[in-house]
Image (cartoon, coloured by chain):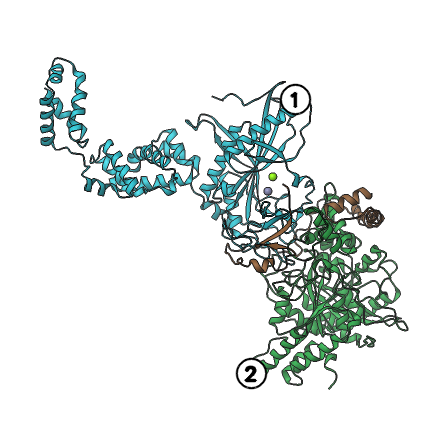
Chain colours: A cyan, B green, C brown
Amino acid sequence: MASTAYRVHGETGEWEVVIGLEVHAQVTSNAKLFSGAATEFGAEPNSQVSLIDAAMPGMLPTPNRECIRQAVRTGMAIGAVINKWSRFDRKNYFYADLPQGYQISQLFHPLVGEGQVEISLDEKDPEAEVKTIGIERIHVEQDAGKLMHDQHPTRSYVDLNRAGVALMEIVSKPDMRSPAEAGAYLAKLRSILRYVGSCDGNMDQGSMRADVNVSVRRPGDEFGTRTETKNVNSVRFVMQVVEIEAKRQVEEIEAGRRIVQETRLFDPDRGETRAMRSKEDAHDYRYFPDPDLLPLELDDAFLEACRASLPELPDAKRRRYESELGLTAYNAAVLTADADTARWFEALLAESARVQAKGEQEVARASANWLISDLFGALNRLGKDLAESPVSPVQGAELLALVADGTLSGTLAKQVFEIMLETGEGAPKIVEERGLKQTSDTGAIEEVIAGVLAANPNQLEQYRGGKEALFGFFVGQTMKAMGGKANPAVVNELLKKALG
Amino acid sequence: MSDITDLGIAQLRDGIRQGKFSGREVADAFVVKVSRAKALNAFIVETPEHAIAAGKAADEALAAGRPLAPLAGVPIGMKDLFCTKGVQTTAASHILEGFKPVYESTVSQKLWDAGAGMLGKLNLDQFAMGSSNETSYFGNVISPWRKRGSNAAMAPGGSSGGSSSAVAARLCPGATGTDTGGSIRQPAAFVGISGIKPTYGRCSRWGVVSFASSLDQAGAMARDVRDCAIMLEAMSGFDPKDSTSLDLPVPKWEEGLSSDLRGLRVGVPAEYLVDGMPAEIAALWQQGIDWVKDAGAEVVEVSLPHTKYALPAYYIIAPAEASSNLARYDGVRYGLRDLPEGANLQEMYAATRAAGFGDEVKRRIMIGTYVLSAGFYDAYFTQASKVRTLIARDFDNAWAVCDLLLTPTAPSAAFALGEKLADPLAMYLNDVFTVPSSLAGLPAMSVPGGLDKDGLPLGLQIIGKPLDEQRVLNAGLAIEERAGFTARPDAWW
Amino acid sequence: MSVDSATVKKVASLARIAITDADADRLVPELNNILGWIEQLGEVDTKGVEPMTAVIPNTLRLRDDVVTEGGQRDAVLANAPQGEHGFFTVPKVVE
Ligand SMILES: [Mg+2]
Ligand SMILES: [Zn+2]
């Protein structure tokens, strides 16, 4: 079952790549970690800056409960140890995006300890190839501000809107061995965070970004020296960085050079990584406990409330969709990969069951199939995502109900759906106004059949002479004559009778 | 009527209420005093309009029959470590010269809310680092005191040297101070006034320029114990903006004042009898013991075995915290920027900080940076933090057998300016008696005990249990009543 | 542990304080004097002793997640030595 191990083919032989990810995820909160300034994305420069964020003299941090709560819930979602006693430390370095001259972080006593994330490496069958990636820790820390270098010939501009926003740094163990594993891990982590609601996962807005630690070694050897490529902001880029960096390291080593432990930057346009000049001498961070903050002590009631507020998580949901709803493994995986999709599906399911007065498991398969093939297909075509869908779960359920009760054939349903997408109107109205209803009126169908038989005497003769394959021809002719609105079952039945 | 500026806080407060004089008269009298005392260099900025406004406000309230705030019309001096909205705040450093905060520190705001007015921003050792007020960018503060028969300029103590000098010279009836390792108590002792540092967490640190966060604590400096109690009451109280602030009600310290010490046990720590303690200091200490006994207390000998390690632990912890706290002074968002031709960002930082910080500040930042740097952290910082635990434990053990501790405030009387400047270590040793209680966060105060052979004041220190400011004040009052300290410097300035 | 001139320069660089060679040389004995003195702490037996974490027993309070500050760009920039278009500015940085 295990896929062939990923290897870099060097001139001197095969190399194995070892990958660890430090993911910075912005905690969903209204206010910053230690100040009352807003966290919203895209505001005017320096408009969401408190005196604390600007590190004015005498300003002091006070921690935001919601940020702690979300980090704890995240830890619980990955089955991690929650440390009831943790502390904030200062990481000291000088940079223009860091007003205090230190980042408040957690080194010695992080809030969340060891946990794990399961990744699936076979898209078609999520249980076929599963790997557990260890999580070392999750700590809570402040984000830095933003520098802009292209506004002025000799100056960089400093915007502190992001400075002080709460981040979770989720540190994996060096458990990944291929670009695919690194990509799957990041995607899975994003999925979990979005389910938990602790991070919106908007990678293009920087809500989630990964520091990619890569080293290479001969299979089975000791770990090699690693490099850290900072702030990689998509799953695809993470996979690229692993590939590029592993290849570069192999080339370096094979050329007789040593790998330097350093911080690198990814240039997606050039498809390369390069050493980061600004971090050249940032090796001695002089961590020590922040004396402005006391130890963080969490009680059982707080932890219990965090646990009680956790939603069903993607793996559990996927398994339940298979076992209880009878969905295929693939469909279950597709529907649970993202929290929004699962939420949409469950709204559709509930509404379908309600309007059809059936159990959810009875309508699940039809609902899943329609969502995955019809709606996703249409959205794909329109370049929209589920949140922008012109058809709501309630409207979807109405359409499915019309199919279930025989009002619409599959073909008619597709026609109606297209009209729904265009007009935003509901299926019942479309069916009513455009007369797209399927008919089971035997008299009308018999009349049409009679006409079809009369118009095709040759075929009739051949059929009656034993060429039974022509049955389909008569069905097609009848359906065509009825504009696709006849109930195919009734057509079949009446044709058989008429053909004798 | 005697000169208004001879009166203390309680007398001014009561006199205004009773209509003996107006708030405006009080403000005017002190404003004039301040303006004529430039030779002391106690103020970096004078704010007569602020004091006058508070005086007028008191008069208006009185005239309108409105209740008067606790400090209505009382003008005070504000150590220039407290951020004051719209008024230059420098921490006596070039790096903050011209900085006008857009915010008001919690402690100063509480004083204004209590009706006090501000005469100005008081000079101090740069970033509160020093024991003689010789590290200010704005020049030394001069003590109003002189050795008998000498015109040599004396140190007012530090770091709240502007505060001590101004109160002793009657430029203001009270002043705020901050105490990290003795910066209220030692200067109070040097100039013959009282000063109290409350329990760590009583006064909010919000808006106070940080030196060492785990030690910094604001407090009151005034001419007597009652005035200290009144002022501290106005300054204290829970502040949600400071995570280390104590969420406790402020006791009515003035109301609770009593010099009756019967039933109390006062401990005398054996380890404070240091080698080479001047005979006069030892004699004063003995005198203090006799006074508290006279007030009814039982005196017991106690042991604080880790005392000798307090100073070295302090000189790791305080500089370490300071090295980080002062990283924000980088020339980007406020204060001085020194940008040499062609300098990059990191060079700008280095140039700005080299030009903006004084020698002592740089020295401490260097020590702090070194003790936190890779490979040294455990040996220095962790070890010092453990020793700090032991020092606090020493005090806890002492509280099993006594309620208060009595010690000298400083190992000597005031010294001349320049006398210890060349030897930082000798300067650090000044704080030998005040630092241990700072490390343990305990309330402590200094009250004047008498004069030495040169006619310079000497102070006695009382240390209390956590949150027990009341007994500290009471013991201070008992000593004050018995010491009958009325000496004051002749006005040469 | 004692420092030499190179160490002093390294520490000054970490602390972002520009110093001359002469400054460094002057600081060497000064810092060694202080460091030598604080090293007496090594004598103290601290086995089993926890480093102090809170000076006075007190626990960290957590704040409600409410926006209470912001929209004060002018106040934030009021003391800036250099600013433009609502930004602080610094010499151009190459990342
Ligand atoms: Mg990292
Ligand atoms: Zn981080």
Nearest the camera: A3 or A258?
A: A258
Q: Amino acid at mark 1?
A: Glu
Could you tell me if residue C1 is visible in this image?
Answer: no
SS category of the residue bearing label 1: helix
The answer to whether residue B27 is above or below residue B350 is below
Q: CA distance from mark 1 to mark 2?
A: 90 Å
Could you tell me if residue A16 is visible in this image?
Answer: yes
Nearest the camera: A39 or B471?
A: A39
Name the residue at 11% across, 28% down: A448
Mark 2 — on which chain does it sit? B
The answer to whether residue B423 is above or below residue A85 is below
Mark number displayed over residue A315: none
For the C terminus of chain A, the image quarter is top left
Instruction: Give x and y (percent) for residue B133.
Output: 78, 63
The answer to whether residue A146 is above or below residue B209 is above
Name the residue carrying label 2.
Answer: B64
SS category of the residue bearing label 2: loop
Picture quadrant where residue A244 is located: top right
Instruction: Give x and y (percent) for residue C18.
Output: 76, 49
Image quarter where ligand 2 lies: top right
